Image (spheres, rainbow, N blue to C red):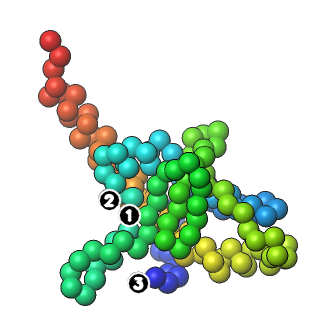
Amino acid sequence: MRGLKKKATKKGQKNMAKLKISGNAIVLTSDLKLDTIKKMEKYNPDALIIFNETKNGDREEVFKIGSGAISGISVFGITFAETNKAGLAVATILLPETIPNDAKKQFVKDVFGNTIFLLQDLEAAVKTSCEELDAAYAELDKIIVEE
């Protein structure tokens, strides 16, 4: 089920992902570090996916984030290929040059608005999953002994 949904935010909660329009470029900065995304791709790739349950009980991939050599942003997911100075994951794509300057923001909202909402939902879930993974691996350090 795709569609814009109103986000319930707690008082004082900051927005996660940030999107900047610079000329014909869209620069999307996640609240996740690129290293975190890569770690989750390796150890828990399902944490990077939003699934819907189908009528017959199967899971259907709706949205996914990941890392790659080339950035990409679509209604189906985001590929992050860059980082900023803080190590946060960045995806940069170009807008069509035919879009007038005064229409770019509305175009981005119309085309990528739901993508940003889904990313924000996924960022929170990935952070929790990564914390759980880190805790589990910390336990392994207690169990594995080198002689």
Amino acid type of disc 2?
A: Asp
Q: Is residue 136 above or below residue 122?
A: above
Q: Is residue 37 left or right of residue 145?
A: right
Given residues 16 and 85, the one toward you in this image is 85
Q: Which mark is residue 41?
A: none
Query: Mark 2 highlights which residue?
Result: 46
Which residue shows up at 39% across the image and 58% down it? 48
Q: Secondary structure at mark 3?
A: loop
First in sequence, mark 1 or 3: give its number: 3
Query: Mark 1 highlights which residue?
Result: 49
Q: Is residue 130 above or below residue 145?
A: below
Q: Is residue 137 left or right of residue 23?
A: left
Q: Toward which corner of the image does residue 147 lie, by quadrant?
A: top left
Amino acid type of disc 1?
A: Ile
Q: CA distance from mark 3 to mark 2?
A: 18 Å
Query: Mark 3 highlights which residue?
Result: 1
Amino acid type of disc 3?
A: Met
Q: Residue furthest bottom?
A: 55
Q: How crowded is the residue under tag 3: few (<14 C-alpha within 10 Å), some, or many (20+)?
A: few
Q: Is residue 113 left or right of residue 3?
A: right
Which residue shows up at 32% across the image and 59% down it? 46
